[in-house]
Amino acid sequence: TKILFNDSIIERKKLIDIEDRGYQFGDGIYEVIGVYDGVFFMLDEHLQRLERSAKELQISLPYPISKLKKYLMELVHVNNLKEGVVYLQVTRGEAERWHYFPSSDTKPILVAYTKLEETLRKEEDHGATAVLTEDIRWLRCDIKTLNLLPNVLAKQKAVENNAVEAIFYRGDIITEASASNVFIVKNKEVYTHPANNYILNGITRRKVLSICKELGIKVNEQTFKVKDLLDADEVFITATKLDIVPIVKVDQQVIGFGTPGKTTREIVEAFRGSILEIDHM
Ligand code: PLP
């Protein structure tokens, strides 16, 4: 398959220098963008978030977002990707290893490639299990940076416990999960952590919030506690291409009736509908 390397679409090969700041410091940002039936889902939102991450870390993008958008569409086309994601990252570039920013003429390095990935349909229909783990991340979780060690450790814990996700708690507050946002349903109302520095404001999360509005489901962007999660009627997680996965067991405790709840199913249905709409545009 082909990849996007700065401003050319080329064959995949080894390209990155040992002094790339992404490689040495995790000094970079990324996006994972869903592709359904060959078409991007919420591409503009992902690119806007990339621009924001870049700004927050004072990383300059190599060229305007409008140009990047054209390259990404070309990449999906040349690789004939139908179901999957585009992984995109930008590092601060290659420079002699010093912690401080390199000189202003250092060029950022942008890489994007396509990856086959299918929606977890079985989990979406039947529900999945999660584990709880302490949120030991830094205080700028709103930036989508390459620094993912706490997320890596958390996801490994989930895998070792045959769970799909590890849900983070900071103090007694549920923030999000290792690679997804967390929602609970209590008395037919939805709760999710507010979009502040403690979580990544997921693109799927935003879509779910707008779906809830359309469906007349009340959403509270409010913090909730570990106890509230365990006592919830329903729990679900959201992320790109994972879409919406109902969580029916957390740390061996059954949530609600142990099956995907009515409100979650309603939201999943509407979400699937919005994907079909995109495909036919
Ligand atoms: N939270 C974290 C920590 C993530 O890494 C991700 C995505 O990978 C999400 C939330 C979900 O974001 P999105 O819906 O934009 O994929």
Image (spheres, rainbow, N blue to C red):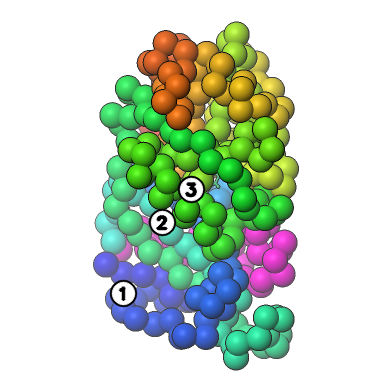
Task: Calculate the distance from the C-alpha at mark 3 to the C-alpha at mark 1.
Answer: 30 Å
Q: Residues within 10 Å of mark 1 (few under 14, many from 20)?
A: few
Q: Which of marks 3 and 1 is nearer the N terminus?
A: 1
Question: According to the image, label 3 marks what residue?
Answer: 154
Q: Is residue 174 magenta?
A: no
In the image, what residue occupies the spot 71% across and 81% down? Answer: 100
Disc number placed over residue 94 in the picture, else none: none
Q: Does the magenta stretch include residue 55?
A: yes
**Magenta region: which residues?**
49-78
Q: Which amino acid does label 1 sit on?
A: Arg
**Which image quadrant for residue 280?**
top left
SS for callout 2:
strand
Front in this rendered view, residue 136 or 56:
136
SS for callout 1:
loop
Q: Pinpoint residue 226: horizontal percent, then vertical percent.
A: 61, 28
Q: How crowded is mark 3: few (under 14 residues within 10 Å), some or many (20 or more)?
A: many
Q: In this view, does 260 lie to the left or right of 139?
A: left
Q: Which of marks 1 and 2 is nearer the N terminus?
A: 1
Question: According to the image, label 1 marks what residue?
Answer: 12
